[in-house]
Image: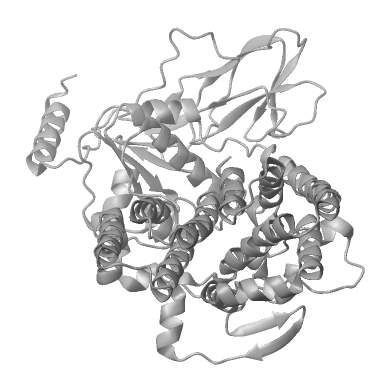
Amino acid sequence: MLQGATAARVVTACGVRSRWAAVAAAVLAIGSIFFMGRYSHIALSSHFVILWALALYFEDVRSRRFAAGRHFVLGALAILVNPYLFVMVGVLQVTTYATLWMNGVVRAADWGRAALVLGGVLAIALVEGYSAIFTGSASMGAPGFGHYSWNLATLLVPPGEFWGNPTGIVRDATGGQTEGEAYIGLGAALVFVACLLVRPRRILSAVRQHWLLCTTLLACAAFAASNRIFLGSRLLLDIPLPEAMTVATSFLRVSGRFVWVPGYAIILLSLAVLVRWAPRALVVPRVALAMVAQLWEASVTLTRLRSTSSRLHPELVETLQLRSWMEAHDRMFQFPSFWCGGLVPNIAFGSRESNRELQTELLVARVGIPTNSVYTSRPLKDCPAEARWAERPVLEARVLYLLSKAVKGRTAELARLATSSACLDAGWGFVCSRDPLRPSDSSGTSAPLIAVEPKIIPVCDDSGLGTTTVHWKAPDGIRSVEVRVGQPDGPLLAVGRAGTRSTGESVSGGMIFYLMEQGKPLTEESALARATAYLMRAECGRALAPRPGPDARLGLFTTARAAFARAFKTP
């Protein structure tokens, strides 16, 4: 909604007072691939701040005054959304102020207002966490400048899914230039070409009048192209960067995104020029055709996005159970956290196992308790400090711990903790707490389609296997179901509309039992219900391992009491 509204504001700020032109601006801006293509990168979808900054430029230049309050709101919002967008917005804001100063309309009071805007936005940035740049700046940078760049060919050459690629022009020569996607769309291209043909002299006059803005747009395009400039597969220029420049560019390593600024300027300013200066008989059919073309191409992108967003990833953690444990605690501590190794060995983004961590993060966010682990675009974790916890792991009260299976081989203390009665084996990791971890309470809800009893299985040997009983029933309208073990297509445990079946001593920690409709595909998506079993180290005739706590005397007392019980055989 804001993308369309601010696009309409840009053409209005250029002096175009037309509702249908405002609608056309919204269609062209929303239908651009570098907006729609940001679907999976939510913070970077807020392109409306770029359009807002463009609108403020023309509004301030036309009114010959610096709207300090609006610039402060825009700058504060941009830094709270995304640093890339903040820099793009900031460059346009500086251009606005510099243009007003060169036009001789900046008053003494405006310098004070500009300083307040800058100081206020920087204060918000420091409070938000960007103060880390002064203490650990290397953690905010990352390599990739020159790789995630803009390929000049993408401005007018469409992706293959639109019209095919009969010319065979390469649009991504580095493997990362999709980040610099700049195809403005067929509709916008038609408007741009018409604009150049109709009033070339007036366009040159406007360029001279707004030469500083045009210089800024060219500078953004040059930064987007980076020091390795490609046209298709051809490397036009490769400029070696000094070490200081390499460090500086690491903070905005995905330079290709800066092409959005000149891209939106081409789309919306061309429309404003065409509507304002061209004969209406030419403008109306050309703009109508442009909207149809832009919408058609957008529908191709939309179809792909719908296909992507409609596919549910399999549930890799038992949401109801894990949520109930989270709600019983005040904080969650994961070891190792995402950036320090993660719960699972393969945390490549988009992998099945990384989705387990993302599902856990989403769940803890919905519960609303603090956590030490989250997927971010920069590794800001102090991993050595986190690793020191493993040297003497202590479970604090009201804290839920998620431990990787790999911790058993990390230190002897962690190995003892993982196999103590304080922790449950969830298959993908250990869930630990000083407080008893109980099965989720399903009271007040309908009986589940499949359940295990006991859900938390006590074991006392080293086999890592336990015994439980599975109860199941088919939902209404389904005549017969299957109970599968471990996977939707795993070993068959039972068949029938309803029943109970013992598993024998074959249940490992985190084992999932799937309820599948008989005769249907055996996939995660077609599973009717799931039930998970957990293992817990039990006493089994010997003393319970002491639960780690902040008070060593408590552990000593527990050990002494257990020794006394063994000596006198008291219950």
**Residue 364 sits in quarter:** top left
Q: Is residue 263 above or below residue 419?
A: below
Q: How is the image coloured?
A: one colour
Q: Is residue 254 above or below residue 308?
A: below
Relative image position of residue 349 (x, y in whole percent): 56, 56
- Which quadrant is home to the N terminus? top right
- Which quadrant is home to the C terminus? top left
Could you say which is closer to the camera, residue 72 or residue 159? 72
Identified at 78% across, 20% down, the residue is: 518
Quick check: can you spot residue 345? no
Identified at 64% across, 53% down, the residue is: 35
Relative image position of residue 400 (x, y in whole percent): 31, 37
Could you say which is closer to the camera, residue 358 or residue 86? 86
Could you say which is closer to the camera, residue 175 or residue 322? 175
Identified at 40% across, 22% down, the residue is: 439
Looking at the image, residue 372 sits to the left or right of residue 266; the answer is: left
Identified at 26% across, 52% down, the residue is: 413
**Residue 554 sits in quarter:** top left
Looking at the image, residue 2 sits to the left or right of residue 133; the answer is: right
